[in-house]
Image (tube, rainbow, N blue to C red):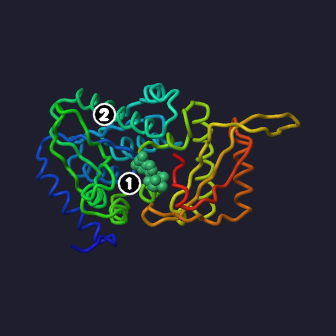
C-alpha cells in the first residue's frame, strides 16, 4: 500500500476507514481512552466522523499532563467536534498514590496501574459497550512482536471487561498518522506534537513528586514550549522539556537570600529515541528563557542546560 504522504492520500484513507469502521461497529457502542496525543486523537476524530455519539471518549487527567492539555482535549473534542467525552479529574487520586514514592520504576507502575483502574471504573459505569478503540500504530505492533517494550496502550484491562478491538491506524507510521490528523482538521499543536511519555511530567519531577515542585515543572515547561514556538524551534527540535530535580540551592533575589529549586532544560534531536544529540540553542534565547523562568516560576532560582547526548544520558531523567 502507498504510504500516506499527501492530503489526497489521507482523504482516500479516511473514506476507506469510515466504511470499514461503520461495517465493523454497526449500531454498537465504542469506548476510547483519549489522552490528547496524536494517535488517540486521530482515532477519536475518525470515529466521531464514522459513528458520532456511539463513541464515548474518556479523558483521564492524572495531574501529570502539560499546561493546557486537558483544556485543549475538552475544547477540541467536546466543544468543536461534539464528541461524547467523559472528563475524569483524577489528579488527587494519582498524586496521593505517588506521595513519598521516589523510585522511578515504582512511580511508572503506580501511574500505569492507576490509569487502568480509573479507566476500568469509568467503563463499568457505561452500558452496552462492545468495542474498545485504541491508537495502536504500526511501530507498536513491530516493537511488541520483537519484545522491545510492553505495548502500553490500554492493555491489561480486567477480565470482566472484554471488548473487541477497533484499531483504525494500526498499519500507519507516525508521520502518516499526522497527515491523516491534519486532514481530519485537528489543530497543528496536536498533530505535530513532540513525543510525550505516558507517565507524563511524573518522570520529570525527579524523585518523590510534590504538588509545588510539579507546578514549577508545569510552568517552566510551558515557558520553554512558548519560547520554542515563538523562535521557530518547535517544529525543528525533536523533543524539549524541563526537569525539576528534588534539591535546592542558594540564590539571591531583591537583595535577599533564596533557597530554591533549579530547572534543567533538555532539548534533543533523535530519529527513533534510541540515540539523541543536543540541539545547539542560541545563547541569547537561553538567556531569555532563563530570565523568564527565574522571574515567573515560583520556587525556582537557577536554570541549567543539559548538554548530555544519549548515550550516556537517557532522554528523560528517570
Ligand atoms: P529515554 O528516557 O529512555 O526515552 O531515552 C526514550 C523515549 O521514550 C520516552 N519515554 C517513555 N514513553 N512511557 C512512555 O510512553 C515511559 O515510561 C517512557 N519513558 C521514556 C521518552 O520521552 C523518549 O521520547
Left or right: residue 136 versus residue 101 is left
- What's the residue at 50%, 43% (across, down)? 203
Q: Is the residue 256 above or below the residue 134 in the image?
A: above
Which numbered dot is residue 38? 1
Q: Is the residue 126 above or below the residue 262 in the image?
A: above
Disc 1 residue: CB within 8 Å of ligand 1:
no
The quarter of the picture where residue 158 lies is top left
Viewer-nearest residue: 214 or 296: 214
Q: In this figure, which residue is indicated by the disc labeled 2?
A: 119
Real-space CA distance between mark 2 and mark 1, rounded to the nearest whole angstrom: 19 Å
Question: Which of the marked residues, 2 or 1, is nearer the chain's N terminus?
Answer: 1
- What's the residue at 44%, 26% (across, down)? 97
Q: Position of residue 127 (x, y in %)?
A: 18, 29
Pick the quarter of the image with the N terminus: bottom left
- What's the residue at 53%, 61% (across, down)? 310
- Disc 2 + disc 1, Cβ < 8 Å: no
What is the secondary structure assignment of the residue under circle 2?
helix
How packed mark 2 is, by other alpha carbons closer than 10 Å (few <14, some 14-19, many 20 or more), is some
The quarter of the picture where residue 3 lies is bottom left
Q: Residue furthest right?
A: 255
Amino acid at each position: 500500500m502507498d504510504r500516506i504522504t499527501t492530503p489526497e492520500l489521507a482523504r482516500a484513507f479516511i473514506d476507506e476507514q469510515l466504511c470499514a469502521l461503520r461495517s465493523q461497529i454497526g449500531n454498537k457502542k465504542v469506548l476510547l481512552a483519549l489522552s490528547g496525543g496524536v494517535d488517540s486523537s486521530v482515532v477519536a476524530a475518525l470515529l466521531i466522523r464514522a459513528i458520532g455519539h456511539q463513541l464515548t471518549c474518556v479523558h483521564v487527567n492524572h495531574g501529570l499532563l502539560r499546561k493546557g492539555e486537558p483544556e485543549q482535549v475538552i475544547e477540541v473534542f467536546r466543544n468543536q467536534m461534539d464528541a461524547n467525552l467523559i472528563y475524569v479529574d483524577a489528579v488527587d487520586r494519582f498524586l496521593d498514590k505517588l506521595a513519598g514514592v521516589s523510585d522511578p520504576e515504582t512511580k511508572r507502575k503506580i501511574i500505569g496501574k492507576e490509569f487502568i483502574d480509573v479507566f476500568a471504573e469509568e467503563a463499568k459505569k457505561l452500558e452496552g459497550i462492545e468495542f474498545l478503540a485504541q491508537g495502536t500504530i504500526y511501530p507498536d505492533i513491530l516493537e511488541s512482536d520483537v519484545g522491545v517494550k510492553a505495548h502500553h496502550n490500554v492493555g491489561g484491562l480486567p477480565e470482566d471487561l472484554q471488548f473487541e478491538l477497533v484499531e483504525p491506524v494500526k498499519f500507519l507510521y507516525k508521520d502518516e498518522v499526522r497527515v491523516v490528523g491534519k486532514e481530519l482538521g485537528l489543530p497543528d499543536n496536536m498533530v505535530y506534537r513532540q513525543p510525550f511519555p505516558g507517565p507524563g511530567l511524573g518522570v520529570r519531577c525527579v524523585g518523590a513528586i510534590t504538588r509545588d515542585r510539579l507546578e514549577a515543572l508545569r510552568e517552566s515547561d510551558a515557558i520553554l514550549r512558548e519560547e520554542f514556538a515563538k523562535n521557530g524551534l518547535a517544529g525543528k527540535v525533536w523533543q524539549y522539556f524541563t526537569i525539576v530535580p528534588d534539591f535546592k540551592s542558594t540564590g539571591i533575589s531583591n537583595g535577599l537570600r533564596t533557597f530554591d529549586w533549579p530547572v534543567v532544560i533538555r532539548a534533543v534531536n533523535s530519529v527513533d529515541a534510541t540515540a539523541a544529540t543536543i540541539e545547539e540553542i542560541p545563547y541569547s534565547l537561553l538567556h531569555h528563557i532563563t530570565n523568564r523562568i527565574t522571574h515567573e516560576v515560583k520556587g525556582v532560582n537557577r536554570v541549567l542546560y543539559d548538554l548530555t547526548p544519549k548515550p550516556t544520558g537517557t532522554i528523560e531523567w528517570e
